[in-house]
Amino acid sequence: MPNINLLPWREELRQQRQTLFLRLSLLVVLCAGLLVLAYGLMINHQIDHQSARNRVIQLGIENLNRDIQEVQTLQTQREKLLDWVQIIQNLQADRGNMVHIVNNLAQASIDSLYLTQVSKIGNEIQITGKAKNNREISSLMRHLARSTSFDDPVLTDVNSSQNKQGFSRFTLLVNLAPNSFTEKTP
């Protein structure tokens, strides 16, 4: 029987398989490295994209905050203007009332009674004047009490004058009657 030695052939085949295995292993490692690198690049791209979107959203928020601030300043200006309009409307409505008050005071005064100062604070009118005697002051108070425009005349102060003219100085408080001035405003 012939003797055949198959060992070198097996050794060559094993070396070929080992080199093929090493090449395939290197190829798999390379592919895995490329996949990891591609995945990392994709993740970085998505992070950059999301960061850009976040910046756009942040800019939008800042613009909206500026708009909100402008709206708030405009609302405060509007409230101030509405307050001014209300004050002007009240003054406009009260303008005719002052004429009515002065007219009633002129009708109530007599020849020897002089009004030196008339001031209005809220619904109260303070009248300061001079009169020859106390009877004229009483007459003024009765006339104001009968008037539909005034309520509760109260004499707060009467001083006799030191000069030779003989006038007494007086201070009178009178309240405006509620709903006494019904003027129609346009």
Image (cartoon, helix red, strand yellow):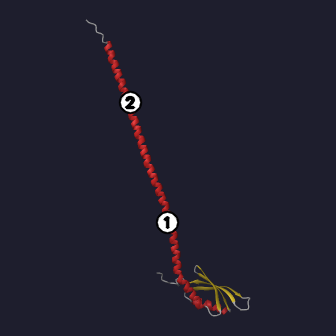
Residue 116 appears in the rendering: yes
> Badge 2, how many Cα within 10 Å: few under 14, some, many 20+?
few
- Left or right side of 34 for 117: right
> In the image, which disc is placed on residue 30?
2
> In the image, which disc is placed on residue 75?
1
The relative height of residue 56 versus residue 157 in the rendered view (above or below) is above
Considering every residue shown, the one lying at the far left of the view is 1
Residue 149 appears in the rendering: no
Q: What whole-number distance in Å separates the C-alpha atoms at marks 2 and 1?
A: 66 Å
Picture residue at 31% right of the left edge, 14% below the top: 9
Q: Quadrant of residue 15?
A: top left
Place of residue 56 in the rendered image (x, y in percent of width and height, measured from the top left): 44, 51
Q: Amino acid at mark 2?
A: Leu
The relative height of residue 126 versus residue 65 in the rendered view (above or below) is below
Out of 88 and 141, give the one closest to the viewer. 88
Place of residue 151 in the rendered image (x, y in percent of width and height, measured from the top left): 58, 85
Picture residue at 42% right of the left edge, 46% below the top: 50
Place of residue 43 in the rendered image (x, y in percent of width and height, measured from the top left): 41, 40
Place of residue 105 in the rendered image (x, y in percent of width and height, measured from the top left): 59, 88
**Secondary element type, mark 2:** helix
- Left or right side of 127 for 46: left
Picture residue at 39% right of the left edge, 33% below the top: 34
Q: Amino acid at mark 1?
A: Gln
